[in-house]
Image: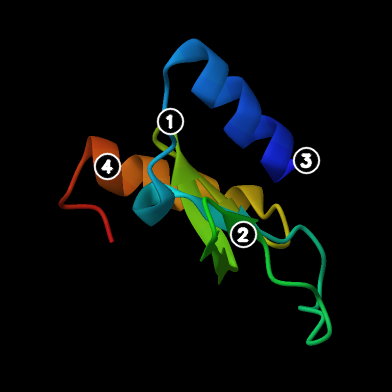
Amino acid sequence: MLRRLESYAARKGLTVNVQKSYVGTFNAYRNPAAPAFRLYNQELEMRDFFTYLGKLFDKHMNLHHAASHALRSFNPVVK
């Protein structure tokens, strides 16, 4: 699938910033045997959480963490 993304981006004259791209897992446990994902021949970092469009996503899809993150972003005094 990532090779198709590379081909599509090349056809449209686009590039994907590998340093800002991550692989997010959405399950309870990270599989140590999971394959490495590569884009433009560079391995993508695996993360248990990431922020996308200002929203926090974690591997458990925990909405409490996302809400807390949103409150801190909106009001930095809240902890």
Give the residue displayed 49% in from the left and 54% down from the top: 50
Q: Which residue is labeled 4 in the image? A: 73
State how far apart marks 2 and 4 are (Cα).
32 Å
| First reached walking from the N terminus: tag 2 or tag 1 | 2
When asked about the image quadrant of residue 5, the answer is top right
Q: Which residue is labeled 3 in the image? A: 1
| First reached walking from the N terminus: tag 1 or tag 3 | 3
**Residues at marks 2 and 3 touching, judged by CB atoms closer than 8 Å:** no
Q: Toward the viewer: 7 or 22?
A: 7
Amino acid type at circle 3 is Met
State how far apart marks 2 and 1 are (Cα).
23 Å
Q: Give coordinates of residue 14: x percent, y percent.
A: 42, 22
37 in relation to 71, above or below: below
**Residues at marks 1 and 3 touching, judged by CB atoms closer than 8 Å:** no
Of badges 4 and 3, the one in the foreground is 3
Q: Secondary structure at mark 3?
A: loop
Q: Which residue is labeled 2 in the image? A: 38
Amino acid type at circle 1 is Leu
